[in-house]
Image (cartoon, helix red, strand yellow):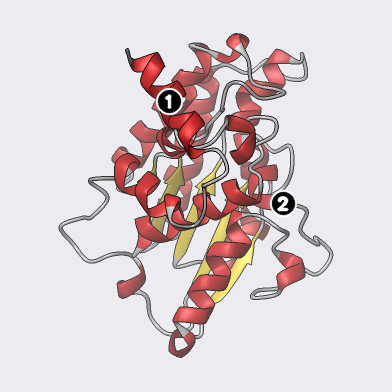
């Protein structure tokens, strides 16, 4: 019955997906996102630094030679660019400085290797991290021998150090995701990849970070259009997928 429902909804949605679908997807996949306390953005001071960190999903082809704040070329063409653009447009009085320091191919330990330069030196008030897909994906193609235990250990050490150095920082942790029925994500990914997702959620709770359930969001999205509409390879989002991720990020921090 559930499979038939998925197929029906998917078929009905093809060709009709638009921006109107995104609020529906997020309402279904992030129903409890509203917190008891005020959102992150409302607590930020004028001139606050916001930093996006991660791998190629965050990097999105950005210009790494300049790496300036609030500069389109320094953001690439991904969800971070879209989210930052909205923040700057809707909050001109806040004079935010927003950076993207994602690097394609990175795993958690590689974030740690550049954390002084690409995090602490920027002194962010908000740090958003999306990391983990390469910690698993590179195992499948023989480029890495890490485990989910190493992923958790490395990630926890990084967050612990970050809290120590920047005790007032607001954290946002994105759930690593992989969307089946695409060119790269197949049955070999599951159930092992689910462990990496679980670690990210566990650490978000432990470090009192806002958690963005990207896997749940994309699972909901494929009920409305085929997986390849949102991400060609199951890891890197399409234009529609980037818009979906950006809206989810904004919903989490408002």
Q: Secondary structure at mark 2?
A: loop
Which label sits on residue 75?
none
Q: Which mark is residue 60?
A: 2
| Residue at 69% from the left image edge and 30% from the top image edge | 233
Q: Position of residue 228 (x, y in %)?
A: 64, 33
Kindly identify which residue carries mark 1. Answer: 8
Q: Residue at x 37, y 75 (%)?
A: 44
Compare marks 1 and 2 and give the one earlier in the sequence: 1
**Which residue: 52% across, 12% down?**
190
Q: Is residue 166 visible?
A: yes
Label 2 neighbour load within 10 Å: few <14, some 14-19, many 20+: many
Position in image of residue 133 (x %, y %): 60, 30
**Quarter of the figure with the C terminus:** bottom left
Residue lying farthest right? 65
User: In screen coordinates, is 99 left or right of 254?
Assistant: right
Residue at the image position 59 percent from the left and 49 percent from the top? 240
For discs 1 and 2, the disc positioned in front in the rendered view = 1
Above or below residue 47? Residue 168 is: above
Please, is residue 144 above or below residue 252 in the view? above
* Residue 210 seen from this side: no
Q: Is residue 194 left or right of residue 188?
A: left
Which quarter of the figure has residue 211?
Answer: top left
Image quadrant for the N terminus? top left
Residue 139: where, in percent of width, then height? Answer: 68, 16
Circle 1 residues within 10 Å: few <14, some 14–19, many ≥20:
few
Give 239 or 184, whichever is nearer the viewer. 239
Query: Helix, strand or loop at disc 1?
Result: helix
Image location (x, y in percent) of residue 246: 51, 56
Q: Quadrant of residue 250?
A: bottom left
Are the residues tagged 1 and 2 within 8 Å (C-beta)? no
């Amino acid at each position: 019955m559930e499979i038939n429902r998925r197929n029906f909804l998917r078929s009905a949605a093809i060709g009709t997906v638009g921006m109107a679908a995104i609020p529906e997807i997020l309402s279904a996949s992030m129903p409890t996102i509203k917190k008891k306390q005020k959102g992150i953005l409302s607590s930020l001071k004028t001139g606050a630094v916001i930093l996006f960190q991660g791998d190629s999903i965050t990097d999105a082809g950005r210009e790494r030679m300049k790496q300036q704040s609030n500069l389109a070329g320094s953001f690439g063409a991904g969800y971070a660019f879209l989210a930052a653009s909205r923040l700057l447009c809707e909050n001109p009085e806040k004079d935010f400085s927003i950076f993207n320091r994602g690097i394609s191919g990175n795993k958690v330990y590689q974030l740690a290797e550049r954390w002084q330069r690409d995090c602490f030196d920027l002194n962010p008030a908000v740090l958003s991290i999306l990391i983990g897909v390469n910690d698993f994906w590179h195992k499948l193609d023989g480029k890495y021998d890490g485990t989910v235990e190493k992923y958790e250990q490395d990630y926890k050490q990084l967050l612990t150090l970050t809290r120590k150095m920047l005790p007032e920082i607001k954290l946002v942790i994105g759930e690593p995701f992989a969307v089946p029925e695409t060119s790269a994500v197949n049955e070999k990914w599951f159930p092992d990849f689910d462990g990496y997702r679980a670690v990210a959620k566990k650490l978000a709770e432990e470090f009192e970070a806002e958690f963005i359930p990207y896997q749940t969001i994309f699972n909901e999205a494929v009920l409305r259009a085929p997986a390849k509409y949102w991400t060609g390879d199951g890891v890197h989002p399409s234009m529609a997928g980037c818009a979906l991720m950006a809206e989810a990020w904004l919903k989490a921090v408002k």
